[in-house]
Image: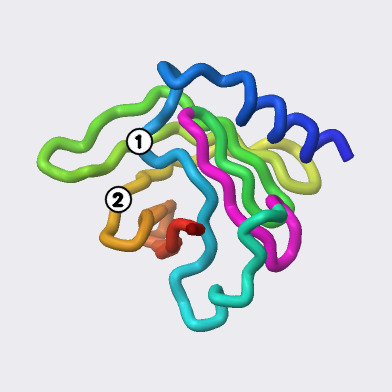
Amino acid sequence: MRLPLLILLLSVLAPAVWAGPFDGRYRPDTPGGESWDCKTIGKDGGAILITSSLMFAVGSRCTLRDPKQVGGMDSTLYDAICRTDGAPWQRRVMIMKTETGVAVVQKGARISLLRKCE
């Protein structure tokens, strides 16, 4: 119950100055992603929310820290400190703009293509 309230407060109170280049709600850019609900965040079949310093996904949330622009690419490299059902864990994450949304590249060359919700 607290997570939706936090998300609502962040989206209402955050000034435009804090807006990040990838801010928005996303769903998987796959045929199965078409059925995802872009209004619900962080639940099965719900949207993934990215802000200038946070990423909320199904069952997890990450704080995005120490952003570094990647030269010649419309992307940013972050130190992501994440929490799921236990102790926090950390990894490097690169978020890159695509024609339809973003690509999230993680350790082990795991790439998630996400389409921006409309």
Disc 2: which residue: 97
Residue interval drawn in magenta: 41-52
Residue drawn at the location 57% of the way across and 31% of the way down: 63
Residue drawn at the location 51% of the way across and 56% of the way down: 26
Question: Which quarter of the figure has residue 98?
Answer: bottom left
> Is residue 63 found left or right of 107 in the rendered image?
right
In the rendered image, residue 13, in percent from the top left (x then y), is placed at 62, 19
Question: Which quarter of the figure has residue 110?
Answer: bottom left
Residue 95 — which label? none
Marks 2 and 1: in contact by CB < 8 Å? yes
Specify whether residue 105 is painted magenta: no
> Is residue 33 found left or right of 105 in the rendered image?
right
Coloring scheme used:
rainbow
- Look at label 1 and name its amino acid: Pro
Q: Which residue occupies the foreground of this view, 98 or 85?
A: 98
In the rendered image, residue 76, in percent from the top left (x then y), is placed at 31, 37
